[in-house]
Image (cartoon, rainbow, N blue to C red):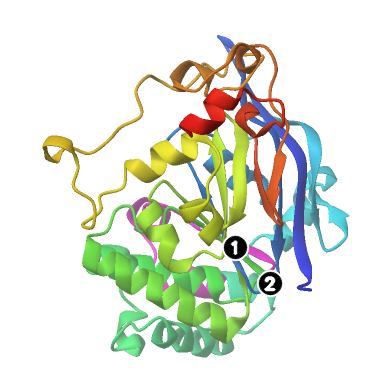
Amino acid sequence: MRERILAVNKLQVSFNTYAGEVQAVRDVTFDLYKGETLAIVGESGCGKSVTAKSLMRLNPEPPAVIKGGEIIFENRDITNLKEKEMQRIRGSQISMIFQDPMTSLNPTMTVGRQITEGLKKHQKLTEVEAQKVAIQMLKLVQIPNAESRFKEYPHQFSGGMRQRVMIAMALVCNPKILIADEPTTALDVTIQAQILELMKELQNKIDTSIILITHDLGVVAHIAERIVVMYGGKVVEKGRSEDIFYRSKHPYTWGLLKSVPRLDIKRNAGRLSSIEGTPPDLLAPPPGCPFADRCQYAMKICRIEMPPMFEIYQLHGAACWINHPQAPTKVKEEV
């Protein structure tokens, strides 16, 4: 059995706004094991990025507030830690690759200086020692002429190279957990494949655990061992990659899978499938299943009570009433 490195239990995160309380994350629960890649997927606004930033306490507090639950890392609940204690964890124990490297990198500082900052802060290295390690890391992420590029600025790098710099910054202190928040969204398809392959190679070398945040199931298929599907601030399904892709049991997951372009299936009139309707308003989330208004299999109970996480197989669960033993036979036959 793998060692569990992170446990998120019933996490609740809200944002206090002028319009009211936005319940962005509602009772999210999942585990992360040493050396594995866990993907959190869902459409924009489902709460996946807020969940990821909560793991490093990067959501601005206020307006963000952790209303409940716990995030257990190394036998400590980091939701209770003070900012100074969190600063010791960020970068050294848990690191993050952000979505857009151009806005994440400081345009006024050389990439070398930005990489060495973490080394000097967390590992107390001298300038010369930190520079050697940073250049080695640039070589590791396959940036050519690392010694000369160490002295260059972000605008002198291409989009793919800037993302490699972000990966170098995130991994330079050998963190135990790497959070990648849609790391390939701003890149073209060819560079996406290179970045994903690079992350897999570095994971094996450094033995870090990865949490990949994305809305692209095509990306997930190549890298993730387990998948958490989020919708309306909640986890609606979770399981191994093969469970989600071939044995999924939630209508929202089916909708996501049908939306992915495939060469082996002919679509009607050559059009991609889409999920009709809009996500729920998290200022006033529905009492029942958040997907009920967009679900063709919705029953009366779906709009009244949130379904529990039904166990489908080992490590595979789905929060949908159609998995209840007493669900109407007709509905089960349709699905």
Q: Quote the CA–CA distance across marks 2 and 1.
A: 12 Å
Residue 29 in percent (x, y) is at 72, 44
Q: Residue at x 35, y 86 (%)?
A: 146
Q: Nearer the viewer, residue 222 or 304?
A: 304
Q: Nearer the viewer, residue 268 or 279?
A: 268
Is residue 127 something one can see in this rendering?
no
Which residue bears the numbered disc 2? 122
Which residue bears the numbered disc 1? 95
How many neighbours does mark 1 have within 10 angstroms: few (below 14), some (14-19), or many (20 or more)? many
Q: Is residue 71 above or below residue 94?
A: above
Pick the quarter of the image with the N terminus: bottom right
Q: Residue at x 80, y 37 (%)?
A: 69
Label 2 with label 1: CB-CB less than 8 Å: no
Q: Horizontally, is 112 left or right of 80 in the view?
A: left
Could you tell me which secondary element the residue under label 1 belongs to? strand
Could you tell me which secondary element the residue under label 2 belongs to? helix
The amino acid pointed to by label 1 is Ser
Residue 171 in percent (x, y) is at 55, 73
The residue segment tinted magenta is 93-117
